[in-house]
Amino acid sequence: MRLLVVADLHYGLPKYDWLASVARNYDLLVIAGDHLDLSSAVDFRAQSVVVGKYLDRLKQQVPVLTCSGNHDLDSRNAEGEKVASWVRALSSEGISADGDSFVLDDTLFTICPWWDGPVVRADLVDQIRIDAGKRDGRRWIWVHHAPPNESPTSWNGSRSFGDAEVREWIEEFSPDIVLSGHVHQSPFVKDGSWVDRIGTTWVFNAGHQYGALPAHVIIDTDRQSALWFSAAGAQEVRLDQPLRRPIPELVALPSWLTSADPAPDRTPG
Ligand SMILES: [Fe+2]
């Protein structure tokens, strides 16, 4: 299975155009939160409508999984906690989103909402516990906007902006992979990184860069490889080997990425 992973697109519409141009080369597209940009001059409700149309186009090409980020919160639940109701509503549009679990081949995905208070957090813990019971030997991947704290994937150059509770959940449940974003600078600053390992769990944060090409991670589970591409360079880690730093720069694209080996056409008939 080949996954394309991005996050923090922040209403960067050329980045969505790029995704639309490459999505069919993958088995799955993961957008790990922060679709919208709260600082944009465009009203966030209009942003969510436009992004929804892009997601609708993307899902015609490839299964799409997405969680909310802190920029995506558009309303409050009954307890007054901020939630991204438009992201949760994507579930009924054929996109796996906040609160969903999704199985593809040998992999179980848990899509985690951004939590702003104890009620959504408690629901998320319940969701993780229920999915732990569904694991049944499968690879388990979480999609969660905030990376764990005290990790190079949450280091912004001066402090960690990660989530302490995510770290505790990783230590308790040992998912195989956590796909995150949130801390834009992590891959680009000293002592930061796009990848970390906590116990047996791999954690990824592709980072945010300006321009039409989003920083992105490609994971090929069959080849046990994860690749990071950005304006600052490209790197590869092997998922079947220990994480060693410094991570070497990728000097040439692997043949499996460049060969004419597209994913099966998943376009509905
Ligand atoms: Fe962000």
Image (cartoon, helix red, strand yellow):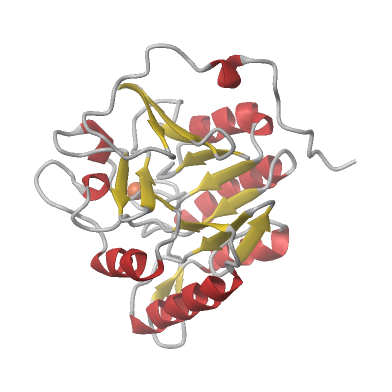
- As drawn, 68 above or below 243: below
- As drawn, 226 above or below 47: above
Q: Answer whether residue 40 is visible to the viewer in this image.
A: no
- The image position of residue 27, as x and y in percent, is 66, 39
**Residue at the extreme right of the image, as rendered:** 269
- The image position of residue 204, as x and y in percent, is 37, 45
Tell me what residue is drawn at x 59 percent, y 43 percent. Answer: 29
Tell me what residue is drawn at x 37 percent, y 12 percent. Answer: 251
Q: Quadrant of residue 12?
A: top left
Of residues 172 and 16, which is closer to you in this image? 172
Tell me what residue is drawn at x 38 percent, y 54 percent. Answer: 201
- The image position of residue 185, as x and y in percent, is 24, 39
- The image position of residue 24, as x and y in percent, is 69, 32
Say left or right for 241 vs 29. left
Q: Quadrant of residue 226?
A: top left
**Residue at the extreme top of the image, as rendered:** 252
Of residues 10 and 101, which is closer to you in this image? 101
Tell me what residue is drawn at x 79 percent, y 33 percent. Answer: 265
Count every numbered label the image shows and give the total. Answer: 0
* Image quarter in which the N terminus is found: top right
Of residues 239 and 5, which is closer to you in this image? 239
Q: Answer whether residue 236 is visible to the viewer in this image.
A: yes
* Image quarter in which the C terminus is found: top right
- As drawn, 99 above or below 147: below
Of residues 135 and 80, which is closer to you in this image? 135
Say left or right for 180 vs 64. left
Say left or right for 62 vs 160. right
**Residue at the extreme left of the image, as rendered:** 158
